[in-house]
Amino acid sequence: MKIDLLYTPGCPKCVANKEGLRATAKNLIPNALWREMNVLDEIEYAVELGVLTLPAIAIDGEVVFASLPTSQQFERELIKRINKEA
């Protein structure tokens, strides 16, 4: 599973929450690829995904959260995807 956090530099929400979200992902899916992407450096990828607001989280190339979720929301989404794959 590939998880992309798309953000802008200086985003206070991102700084405050990204480590908790990353830890949630790694606890549930140890082999997940977690990428933190500055949208200014990855603008073409963000456009390809259809990102309209930041911060955003994409899972396997699909924007799942158009704003930063809580750890509980993120965990529920990951569990739902794990169960689909099983």
Image: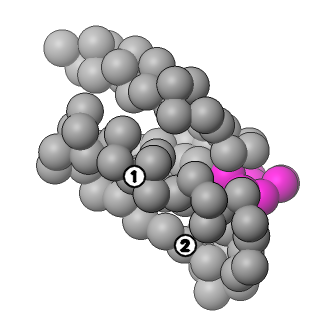
Q: Which residues are magenta?
A: 49-56
Q: Amino acid at mark 2?
A: Met
Would you identify the image quadrant in which residue 7 lies?
Answer: bottom right
| Residue 80 seen anywhere in this rendered image of the structure | yes
Asked if the residues shown at circle 2 and circle 1 are in contact, with their CB atoms under 8 angstroms apart, the answer is no
Question: Element under label 2?
Answer: strand
In the figure, is residue 78 to the left or right of 44?
A: left
Q: Is residue 52 magenta?
A: yes
Q: Is residue 55 magenta?
A: yes
Would you identify the image quadrant in which residue 52 lies?
Answer: bottom right
Position of the N terminus by quadrant: top left
Please tell me which residue lies in front, 12 or 79: 12
Residue shown at the point (45%, 48%) measured from the top left: 20
| Residue 49 seen anywhere in this rendered image of the structure | no
Which percent across, then down, holds residue 13? 71, 58
Please identify the residue farthest to the right as the structure is shown: 52
Question: Element under label 1?
Answer: helix
Q: Is residue 83 above or below residue 11?
A: above
Q: Residues within 10 Å of mark 2 (few under 14, many from 20)?
A: many
Q: Earlier in the sequence, mark 2 or mark 1?
A: 1
Which percent across, then down, holds residue 67? 74, 44
Residue beneath label 2, please? 37
Please identify the residue farthest to the bottom as the structure is shown: 41
Residue shown at the point (58%, 53%) measured from the top left: 17
Residue shown at the point (43%, 27%) measured from the top left: 75
Which percent across, then down, holds residue 2? 35, 51
Residue beneath label 1, please? 22
